[in-house]
Each structure stands twice: as C-alpha cells, then as structure tokens.
Image (spheres, grey):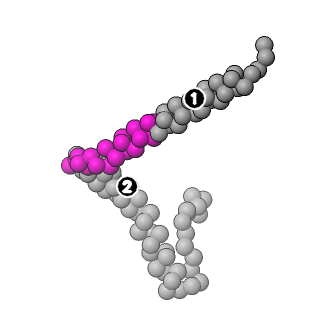
Amino acid sequence: MKHTHKNKSNLWELEEHILATLKHHDYYQNHKLKAKVKHKLNNEKGLGTVEIIIILAVLVALALAFQSFAKKFFTDVRDSIQDPSKSVTIIEDKDS
C-alpha cells in the first residue's frame, strides 16, 4: 500500500483530533478535581463539638500520662540554666 499525501494528511488530522480530545479530557478532569477541592474548602460544617471534646480529652490524657516526666525535665532544664555544671537527664538509668 502506497502512502499518498492524502493518507498522511488524514493521519495528521486524526492525530490532531486525538490530541485535542486528550487535552479536553485532561481539562475536564482537572476542572472536576478543582470543583471538588473548592467544595471541600467552602464546606461550612467545620469541626463539631464532639470532635473538639475528643481532642481536648486526648490532650488532657497525654498531659496526665507524662506529668511526672515533664515536671522532672523542666526542673532539670531550669537547674541546668541556673547551674551550668548540672546536666539535663531525659532518660534515667533503671540500674542507678
């Protein structure tokens, strides 16, 4: 089969049509994604009372769990600032 000028131009037209279709599809997908993101950002619901209470409960539980560690750590830091010969102990040896 001979490739004539007409066949080549039909292939070029087909290629251009395919590229245009792909570009349109990419634009449509990007536009759809942008619309979803915009909808999520404009959502007026926000955090509810239950979520805030749960977050506060977790923070209080963590504060209570690490209370003695935090007190000792910050006391050591304060003491080391006042007396540079002292060091800050983060982890105590169980053997001592």
Residue at 48% x, 35% y is 24
The amino acid type of the residue labelled 1 equals Ile
Tell me the residue at 54%/73% (across/down). Answer: 88
Pointer 1: what residue? 18
Q: Quadrant of the C terminus?
A: bottom right
Location of residue 33 with respect to 8 vertically, above or below: below
Left or right relative to 39: residue 95: right
Query: Gap between marks 2 and 1, in whole Å?
Result: 58 Å
Name the quadrant containing residue 66. bottom left
Q: Seen in the image, is 53 located left or right of residue 84? A: left
Q: Residue furthest left?
A: 49
Report if residue 94 lies within the magenta region.
no
Residue at the spot x=28%, y=54% of the render?
A: 56
Which residue is farthest right?
A: 2
Secondary structure under badge 2?
helix
**Looking at the rendered structure, which numbered label has been put on residue 4?**
none
The residue depicted at 34 percent of the width and 47 percent of the height is 38
> Which span is picked out in magenta?
28-49
Q: Nearer the viewer, residue 65 or 40?
A: 40
- Residue 57 visible (yes or no): no
Kindly check if marks 2 and 1 are in contact, taking CB atoms under 8 A apart as contact: no
